[in-house]
Image (cartoon, rainbow, N blue to C red):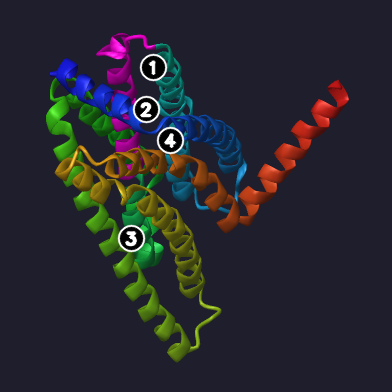
Amino acid sequence: MAEQYCSQVLDSFLKLVRHSRSSILAFCVLQFTFSLVATLGNLLVIRALIKASTIPANVRKMFISLAFSDLAVGLLPQLMDAIIYAVVWKTTSRGDNLAFLCPTVLSVLYHFMYLLVATSFLNVIFIAFDRLLAVSLHLRYQELVTARRVTTVLVSVWIISCVLAIQFIFFPNEIEMVAAVIGLIGYVLTNMAYVRIYKVVKYHQNQIYSQNQLQNAQTREALRQRKSAYNSLFVSVVFLACYFPLFPCTILYMANTSEISFLIAQFASFFLICLNSSLNPLVYCWRYREIRQIVKNTMKKIIHMNENIT
């Protein structure tokens, strides 16, 4: 099973390098560059999230979990993908055989890719529904959504992702269909959650204006949760924008595997998934002033230390 799937993946690499060597070189440079960006960016953001005090504790935990999965994407599948692109480009130019990539190397790459993609996707869904509970429950949210329960769910997210990734080893040909179904369900659920958030926020906003209770403690909490929901919405929008092209690109390529433009689009959609790990730190810094300030201070310290060393 794994050998057959690996051979199909390797054939797509060979087809791409035969028809467009410049494309595979471009993907190699892009993956390597953004692997560094994702690694450094998420390291800075994780440190900032740990030190941040104005962000709700539950939100920080969920963002830290997402940032760790993004960090792992930069360190493992994205860097591995860049190296494989380089190996394919160099080896084929010499006319050597690429059989050594199967089944171990490519299987490890896609195992980690499915693991981390599943983790990120489940984290984003969890964040969406947590924010829905926050704007819906108000002060009751703290009673029902405790720190311990959030930790339990986050641990479960990683365990479920590991189980899904292990399925790739035994059923590699079926995992794409399973991933597509889970992805579609998650996409629909996330959008439904944010549509509901918008309706709840709109209702509470009208209620606040009609009752003129701007100093009420419950109202202040509602406004804080609304802002937090909007901030997490941007993370979800960027995530879905990066992941959604994979579905039409995969369908197009499966419909006509001989069309090179569909193959390039398939590889580009894979790159977009990895690119999401580099964009999330920018979203955190944009939407959260405290994270932005901590990241700036950390970078200044690093630059200052380098200047002292030189």
Foreground disc of the pair 1, 3: 1
Secondary structure under the numbered disc 4 in the rendered image? helix
Q: CA distance from mark 3 to mark 4?
A: 45 Å
Q: Secondary structure at mark 1?
A: helix
**Tags 3 and 4 touching, CB below 8 Å:** no
Determine the residue positioned at 44% across, 44% down.
276
Q: Nearer the viewer, residue 16 or 56?
A: 16
Magenta residue check for 305: no
| Residues packed near mark 3 inside 10 Å, few (<14), some (14 to 19) or many (20 plus) | some
Q: Main secondary structure of the magenta part?
A: helix
Residue at x 19% of width, y 38% of height: 257
Cα–Cα gap, marks 4 and 1: 14 Å
| Image location of residue 72, percent across then percent down | 44, 29
For the N terminus, the quadrant is: top left
Q: Is residue 100 left or right of residue 298?
A: left
Q: Position of residue 205 (x, y in %)?
A: 43, 80
**Mark 3, secondary structure of its residue:** helix
Is 202 located above or below residue 137 in the figure?
A: below
**Highlighted range, magenta:** 95-122
| Horizontal arrangement in the rendering, residue 119 relative to residue 86 (left or right) | left
Which of marks 2 and 1 precedes in the sequence? 2
Q: Is residue 182 visible?
A: no
**Quarter where residue 97 is shown:** top left
**Which residue is under mark 1?**
92
| Residue annotated with mark 3 | 133
Label 1, label 3: how far apart the Cα atoms are? 54 Å
State the residue position of label 4.
Answer: 23
Labels 4 & 2 near each other (Cβ < 8 A): no
Numbered mark located on residue 17 in the image: 2
Q: Amino acid at mark 3?
A: Leu
Residue type marked 1? Thr
Mark 3 → mark 2, Cα distance in angstroms: 49 Å
